Image (tube, helix red, strand yellow):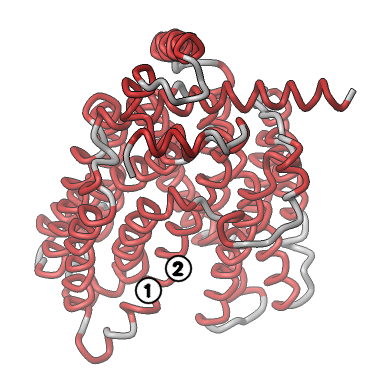
């Protein structure tokens, strides 16, 4: 279809449905001005182009370090600290208090993730209808409330129900926080903004397990609940102080609210990059789940095992702001390809490691690879979607990432009895390399994440947002 033919289709589109048209046909913008056959006059187009340029200039000059942005980073850090702390705490508590087996205690941790996955799917769909701030507050309140039920659960079954509902509240809160922060970040600084935001998760992944290990080693389970209770209270209080940008809901969207279909719960535009995140999650999960057993089996029990995640956190911390800057300046390809390659190198090093130095080298490469994958895929998923679908795109990314982390240990772990741990890590390396091929086939080959194309897409999103606002104002006026 030529650019002019695409323009003819615009005659049949309402302003509210113009998203696909604008983003698809944007490379032909100059043709719009030359075409005498379009209903949108040249003068009208020039006004939109001027407004678009002014908007983007303003976006480029906007500062990233705003109060609400910083508060949301802090709240998300605390949310994930509680999450990581309770993942280890709940397993140890179930084994000691309910005399649960290792597998049943593991179920208590797993149900939290199941609840979070379920919640993310629903939250992404309805967050803008409920209100971003309302969902943030509701999730934070439920997050605090469920903590009080941990120590009073009379049976393991009741404890598992608490874990599931707490996972639901975690999914609501973290999805709302991610959606709010994405709406606070200027489009031109999305890579850096998401990179700094995800640093909170990196810090939490170090603080949470450290506190949990100290608490469980001392069998101070009540102290653990007191700590997470205080943190959850801070989260709720802070959530009340955050001003979340909301968006206007079009009349058609309200009428469409009760319809159920795949594309209403998942962002089709974000599926490709979210699947790359899934592959990264599968690889990371093999390390997260099997590292202790693997290092014991190969006799690496010194600093190679004890300091592995410290080195992993170090390079993750360093890589995320840097790769966010590169993504904003050069596009997605320059960060995704090296990240997947670093993941593959890390898996090969771990698979062949027989000493502390090799294990720590694998940790450094894993931090570079996985830290970049999570931050960049998150930013690119948000970039792919129109501005009114930020919530759905965010939940799509997290659902795929969490699903990869969840299924990785089960799928690849099934090969351990027959082939050993080294085979699992080699298989993970192969998945990372396959991710490079897949990324090229479904995304890079079409030029979706070149800096030039990303700039044009950002401009299109500005036009679409303006058109949607005009349409909403007209509909609101007509209803009165």
Secondary element under disc 2, as helix, strand or loop, is helix
Whether residue 92 appears in this view of the structure is no
Secondary element under disc 1, as helix, strand or loop, is helix
Q: In which quarter of the image is residue 74?
A: top right
In the picture shown, does residue 27 fall above or below 103?
Answer: above
Q: Where is residue 129 in the image (x, y as percent from the top left)?
A: 73, 41
Q: Quadrant of residue 17?
A: top right
Given the current orientation, which residue lies at the most extreme right position? 480
Whether residue 220 appears in this view of the structure is yes
The residue sitting at 30% across, 47% down in the picture is: 373
The residue sitting at 40% across, 64% down in the picture is: 404
Dot 2 alpha-carbon crowd within 10 angstroms: few under 14, some 14 to 19, many 20 or more: many
Q: In this view, does 236 lie to the left or right of 332?
A: right
> In this figure, which residue is indicated by the disc labeled 1?
409
Q: Position of residue 110 (x, y in %)?
A: 54, 69
Q: In this view, does 237 lie to the left or right of 121?
A: right
Which mark identifies residue 406?
2
Q: Quadrant of residue 156?
A: bottom right
Dot 1 alpha-carbon crowd within 10 angstroms: few under 14, some 14 to 19, many 20 or more: many
């Amino acid at each position: 279809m030529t650019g002019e033919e695409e323009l003819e289709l615009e005659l049949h589109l309402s302003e509210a449905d113009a998203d696909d048209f604008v983003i698809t046909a944007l490379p032909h913008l100059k043709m719009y001005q030359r075409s005498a056959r379009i209903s949108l006059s040249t003068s009208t187009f020039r006004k939109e182009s001027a407004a678009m340029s002014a908007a983007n200039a303003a976006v480029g000059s906007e500062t990233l370090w705003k109060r609400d942005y910083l508060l949301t980073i802090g709240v998300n850090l605390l949310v994930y600290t509680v999450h990581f702390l309770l993942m280890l705490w709940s397993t140890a508590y179930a084994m000691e208090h309910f005399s649960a087996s290792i597998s049943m205690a593991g179920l208590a941790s797993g149900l939290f993730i199941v609840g979070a996955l379920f919640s993310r799917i629903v939250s992404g769909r309805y967050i803008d209808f409920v209100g971003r701030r309302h969902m943030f507050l509701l999730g934070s309140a439920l997050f605090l409330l469920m903590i009080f039920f941990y120590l009073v659960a009379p049976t393991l079954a009741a404890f598992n129900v608490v874990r599931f509902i707490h996972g639901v509240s975690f999914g609501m809160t973290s999805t709302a926080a991610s959606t709010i922060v994405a709406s606070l970040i200027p489009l031109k600084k999305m890579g850096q903004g998401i990179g700094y935001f995800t640093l909170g998760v990196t810090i939490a992944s170090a603080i949470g397990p450290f506190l949990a290990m100290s608490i469980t080693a001392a069998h101070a389970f009540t102290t653990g609940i007191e700590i997470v209770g205080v943190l959850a209270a801070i989260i709720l209080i802070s959530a009340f102080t955050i001003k979340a940008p909301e968006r206007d809901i079009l009349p058609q969207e309200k009428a469409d609210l009760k319809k159920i279909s795949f594309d209403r719960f998942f962002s089709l535009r974000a599926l490709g990059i979210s699947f790359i995140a899934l592959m990264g999650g599968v690889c990371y999960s093999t390390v997260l789940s099997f590292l202790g057993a693997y290092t014991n089996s190969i006799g690496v029990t010194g600093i190679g095992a004890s300091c592995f995640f410290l080195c992993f956190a170090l390079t993750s911390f360093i890589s995320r702001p840097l790769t966010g800057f590169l993504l904003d300046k050069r596009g997605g390809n320059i960060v995704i390809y090296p990240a997947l390659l670093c993941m593959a190198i890390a898996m090969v090093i771990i698979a062949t490691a027989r000493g502390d130095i090799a294990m720590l080298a694998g940790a450094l490469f894993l931090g570079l690879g996985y830290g970049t994958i999570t931050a960049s895929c998150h930013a690119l998923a948000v970039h792919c979607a129109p501005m009114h679908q930020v919530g759905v795109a965010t939940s799509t990314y997290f659902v795929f990432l969490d699903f990869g982390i969840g299924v990785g240990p089960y799928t690849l772990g099934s090969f351990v009895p027959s082939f050993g741990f080294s085979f699992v890590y080699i298989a993970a390396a192969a998945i990372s390399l396959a991710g490079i091929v897949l990324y090229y086939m479904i995304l890079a080959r079409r030029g979706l994440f070149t800096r030039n194309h990303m700039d044009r897409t950002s401009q299109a999103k500005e036009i679409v947002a303006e058109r949607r606002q005009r349409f909403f104002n007209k509909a609101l006026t007509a209803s009165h």
